[in-house]
Amino acid sequence: MTFIFMTFALMAILGGCLTILARNAVHAALGLVGCLISVAGLYVTLNAHFLAAVQVIVYAGAIMVLFLFVIMLLNAARPVTEENPVPFVTEIAGVAACLVIFAMVVIMNSFKAPAIPEAADRLQNGAPGPIGEALFTKFLLPFEAVSILLLVAVVGSVALVKRPEQQQEDLPEGELVGTFEGERQEVKA
């Protein structure tokens, strides 16, 4: 069982790396789908079958359809070839990655293992009732924060992909600007 868990963990890491490193937005979304399905496999190895089903239905299904809809709506499927419009984004991402790695090291060094039998009894092997009760009572604020985070992610993707409108240049008098039902239209001053 440990080998299967490690395999799903490796697949989740590879899917996350593909999501980050892909130049095409559709390929990045497919990498995220692979990562989410691998996380569902991790839930199965932990005997949380309900969480695995919810992971596949809600995240790998509904949320990814929403993301792909936004990608296709905004024609973001084209590969990124231009230079980054945000100045110093690579440096900022590097500093953020170092901070995350530092935080993970601190968390790993200060981690205390929870009482597994008590936690397993409370969650009853991933049954929906206790999970829903925990989400909507003790963890209501983080649950709502995740929903706002998803909304911000969609709005941010729309803002990042939206192209500026092309401005028409001033055309000299008499120059052809377009046709309407076969007739020529000219600019008149």
Image (cartoon, grey):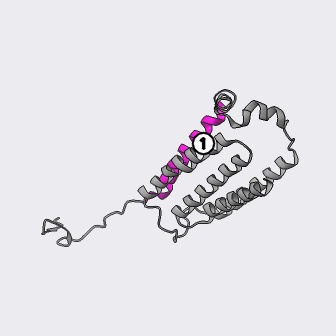
Point out residue 85 in the picture as x, y percentages from the top left corner.
Answer: 54, 63
Between 12 and 111, the one nearer to me in the picture: 12
The part of the image, by quadrant, that contains residue 10 is: bottom right
Quadrant the C terminus occupies: bottom left
- Give the magenta range: 140-163
Above or below, comparing residue 23 to residue 43 in the picture = below
Point out residue 104 in the picture as x, y percentages from the top left corner.
Answer: 79, 51
Point out residue 154 in the picture as x, y percentages from the top left corner.
Answer: 51, 49
Above or below, comparing residue 179 to residue 63 in the picture = below
Side of 2 where 59 appears, left or right: left
Side of 173 where 170 appears, left or right: right
Element at label 1: helix
Point out residue 93 in the picture as x, y percentages from the top left corner.
Answer: 67, 59
Q: Residues within 10 Å of mark 1 (few under 14, many from 20)?
A: some
Residue at point 84% right, 49% down? 108
Residue bearing mark 1: 54
* Residue 140 visible here: yes
Residue at point 52% right, 71% down? 81
Between 2 and 137, the one nearer to me in the picture: 2
Total labels drawn: 1
- Residue with the most extreme front position: 1
Asked if residue 73 is among those painted magenta in the image, a careful observer would answer: no
Three-letter code for the amino acid on which mark 1 is drawn: Val
Residue at point 23% right, 71% down? 172
Magenta residues, dominant SS class: helix
* Residue 88 visible here: no
